[in-house]
Image: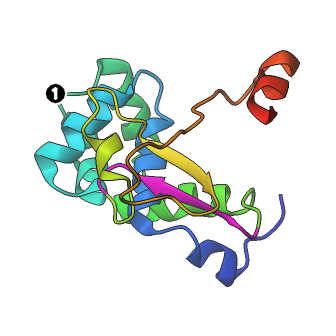
Amino acid sequence: MAPVTTAAAARVDLRVGAVLALAEADGAGPLAVRELVDRTGDPLAALAAAPAAPELSRTARAAVRARLAGGSAERLARRAGAAAARRLEPDDRLLAYGAPGYPARLGRLYFPPPILWARGPLPAAAPRTVAIVGTRRATRPARELAHE
């Protein structure tokens, strides 16, 4: 595993790391993440509250509790953010539900994506926008279609 430079780690906000850590927990879906962040008012507070959060499934609470063992929510958020920073290209950035920069229109969805991996500018007030939300393991035809 390559070490994360300070500059790379700084590209991922602590709140983004907190949502990454929440979203990576088995059984923590977009709705549960949204409800937990909304209730606590901040992604880092949501991560700290996750082990006892009624919004999360028992499996997700246990997964977060295990990842928090021996450390704080801030430390787990930093680790999750640093791991993501290693995969970012220079023009990439991560946006997280409940953190600055997350598109307000997406935040109003019932199941808003907890994390957006963005490249290029996000039009703030465009009347129509297009986003491609995909999978980590897209098929070749899906990648070709997205490229077109």
Can you name the residue that lies furthest to the front here?
127
Which quadrant holds the N terminus? bottom right
Q: Report which residue position mark 1 lands on.
A: 54
Instruction: Look at the picture and state if 83 lies above or below 3.
Output: above
> Residue 105: x, y in percent?
31, 45
Q: Which quadrant of the figure has residue 55?
A: top left
User: Closest to the observer: 6 or 108?
Assistant: 108
**Can residue 71 be seen by looking at this rendering?**
no
Residue at screen point 45% across, 37% down: 23
**Can residue 137 be seen by looking at this rendering?**
yes
Residue at screen point 77% across, 63% down: 89
> Residue 62: x, y in percent?
37, 29
- Label 1 sits on a secondary structure element that is loop
User: Closest to the observer: 33 or 113?
Assistant: 113
Q: Give the range drawn in magenta.
A: 90-98
Q: Which quadrant of the figure has residue 79?
A: bottom right
Residue at screen point 66% across, 82% down: 6
> Residue 114: x, y in percent?
41, 40
Residue 32 lies left or right of residue 90; in this view the side is: left
Residue 63 lies left or right of residue 43; in this view the side is: right
Residue at screen point 37% across, 53% down: 103
Give the colouring mode of the picture: rainbow
**Is 146 within the magenta?**
no
> Residue 117: x, y in percent?
59, 50
Which quadrant holds the C terminus? top right
- Crowding near pointer 1: few (<14 within 10 Å), some, many (20+)? few
